[in-house]
Amino acid sequence: MIDCVGAGRALSLRLCTEGVPDGEAAVFTLFDASDDSELETVEGKVEGDKALCTWTTPDLEEEGKETRRVYYKAKVMGNEVTSPEVEIYRDKATIISLDPDGEPLPDVPYTVVAGKRARHANTGSKGERTEEYLPQGKRAVHWGEGVDLIEWQEEGPVVWKAKLRRQTWFDVDILGILPEEWETDDVFVLTSDDGSFEQKKSVYDDQIKGDDRLTLRFTGIEPGKKYTLKRFLDDELMEVTFESVAYEELIHMG
């Protein structure tokens, strides 16, 4: 497995120098693995049977690259050793959350996955956070509860910018019959009066198990619209739970 290091980070260069007196000069020359072109030379000294120094890897963002492979040749007292290749990659990712109008949407929770690891955080008060020292590997960002994705404006691997909408929801309690006594085929359908919205729920969506009512949560309703909730059994209308109720009244049910 090839060693990896983040762009703009310190890469340790080392050489075993057993038998070489302390204080001897060690020269490390870096090369681009794609074409063997020389990049830079740095110097160190032998101390305790090894020669060590560090090299700051290039900023790949300025080069417009995602990764770059390098290797180095280390020379001490005329003896030269070539290192294995090292992959430089961009180990930062900026996550940006915007509202539907493109303005910062603060404190949106997210999970960023890099390789086999996942981090959980939020976008903070400015709607933007930069994750650093991410491991190498395929990346993805998943938004947490409470928001709906409208669209990605940039989708990785180093910038993840999305327009989001905070979820609006309400709970409706269906009283009179215990949830376990409902027909399992009962379907509750919430629609907007303008026909732009429909959401279905069933007994299996009961929010609070073990109580004396069926509690259903509906999400994604919008201001300025009215909604109707109906119960169907085998596509037959059984009852209208409520009709043409405004958004402003519904959200106070939650």
Image (cartoon, rainbow, N blue to C red):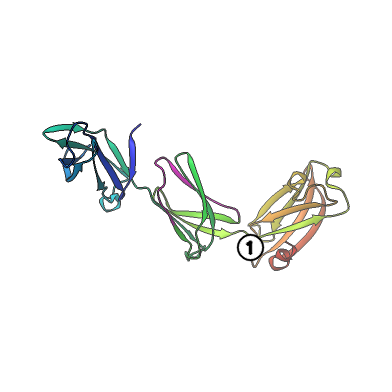
- Picture coordinates of residue 5, whole percent (x, y): 33, 43
Relative to 31, residue 122 above or below: below
**Relative to 118, 217 lies left or right:** right
Residue at x-position 17% and y-position 36%: 21
- Picture coordinates of residue 108, whole percent (x, y): 54, 58
- Residue 73 sits in quarter: top left
Q: Residue 172 versus residue 144: which sits nearer the camera?
A: 144
**Relative to 150, 5 lies left or right:** left
Residue type indicated by callout 1: Glu
**Residue with the mark numbered 1:** 222
Q: Start and end of the magenta stretch?
A: 130-145
Q: Residues within 10 Å of mark 1 (few under 14, many from 20)?
A: some
**The C terminus lies in quadrant:** bottom right
- Picture coordinates of residue 247, whole percent (x, y): 69, 65
- Whether residue 35 is visible, yes or no, is no
- Residue 165 sits in quarter: bottom right
**Secondary element type, mark 1:** loop
**Relative to 13, 221 lies left or right:** right
Q: Residue furthest left?
A: 78
Q: Residue furthest right?
A: 176
Residue at x-position 76% and y-position 56%: 229
- Picture coordinates of residue 4, whole percent (x, y): 34, 40
